[in-house]
Image (cartoon, rainbow, N blue to C red):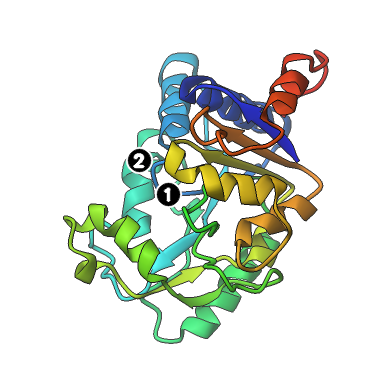
Amino acid sequence: MEVIISDDQELATLVADAIERLLGSETAPVLGLATGSSPLSVYDELVRRHEHNGLTFSNVRGFMLDEYVGLPESHPQSYRNVIDAEFVSRVDFREGAVQGPDGTAADLVAASSDYDRAITEAGGIDLQILGIGTDGHVAFNEPGSSLSSRTRIKSLADQTRVDNARFFGGDVDQVPRHCLTQGLGTIMEARHLLLIATGGHKAEAVHQMVEGSISSMWPATVLQMHPHVTVLVDDPAASRLQLGDYYRQTYANKLDRERL
């Protein structure tokens, strides 16, 4: 696990660099896209490169991490609409190139299996963007989730619903109680994981993920078992890391040929 500690803009630049290299090296790259506040600066940087440098997403497929259950397709907080507004509609993805779990499906179990199958049939995810919740959840894999879980229906923890209430006018009662989410086992099959965390409220979760014991109580700790994961955090989010100085030293002395 590589840990990079820097300011938000450099973190966004590093992730965008990794994505641009992938798009330039693969004929049909597959991106894993996350919603939430963590990747917004990355999406803005990719849009800037698209508009000013000609970076194209015309041959890219994308898969979302999760979706609320029960929200109508027209709801502005449906993650399909959120990712479209934040990123997809601002660049040149082909129509239908970005998919998400179907939270409106009549058979949610079948929809979950179909989603995992669609990722596999696309060749798997080359680079997955991730965030982390204050309780250590990744996607909507709440504490207690199986570390080998697949895409499935999950009940949202009260803390997650409170955290997300700001997107629903501050009314937690408007936040759905269920979701479809990629499982931790599904996420771990991506070839490169890039997790972004900023702000002091993420410090404990970052500490547990990087330096804690692997446990379903902190679902993100399973990332310690992935062969290629990069954790990008700002100083406040890194404030609980016991080896913070070592991570800074390691990054400062990377060889030129070493990249994310």
Q: Residue 197's spot in the image, x, y percent?
A: 51, 39
Mark toward the viewer: 2 or 1: 1
Front residue of this view, candidates 167 and 215: 215
- In the picture, the disc for residue 35 is 1
Q: Specify few, some or many for label 2: CA neighbours under 10 Å numbering under 14, 14-19, or 20 or more.
A: some
Quadrant assignment for the C terminus: top right
Camera-nearest residue between 72 and 60:
72
x, y percent for residue 104: 36, 76
Number of marks in the rendered image: 2
Which residue is drawn at the image coordinates 53% and 59% (left, top)?
A: 137
At x 33%, y 56%, the residue is 163
Marked residue nearer the N-terminal end (2 or 1): 1
Q: Amino acid at mark 1?
A: Thr
Amino acid at the residue labelled 2: Glu
In this rendering, position of residue 96 left or right of residue 1: left
Whether residue 43 is situated above or below residue 77 in the rendered picture? above
The residue depicted at 39 percent of the width and 86 percent of the height is: 106
Could you say which is closer to the camera, residue 103 or residue 197? Answer: 197
| Badge 1 density bin: few <14, some 14–19, many ≥20, Cα 10 Å | many
| Residue 124 visible at all | no
Q: Are marks 2 and 1 in contact (CB under 8 Å)?
A: yes
Q: Image quarter for residue 17?
A: top right
Is 162 positioned to the left or the right of 244 in the image?
left
Label 2 sits on residue: 86
Vertical placement of residue 72 versus 21, above or below: below
Q: Is residue 82 left or right of residue 239?
A: left
Q: CA distance from mark 2 to mark 1?
A: 8 Å
> Disc number at residue 258?
none
**Rendered image quadrant of residue 253:** top right
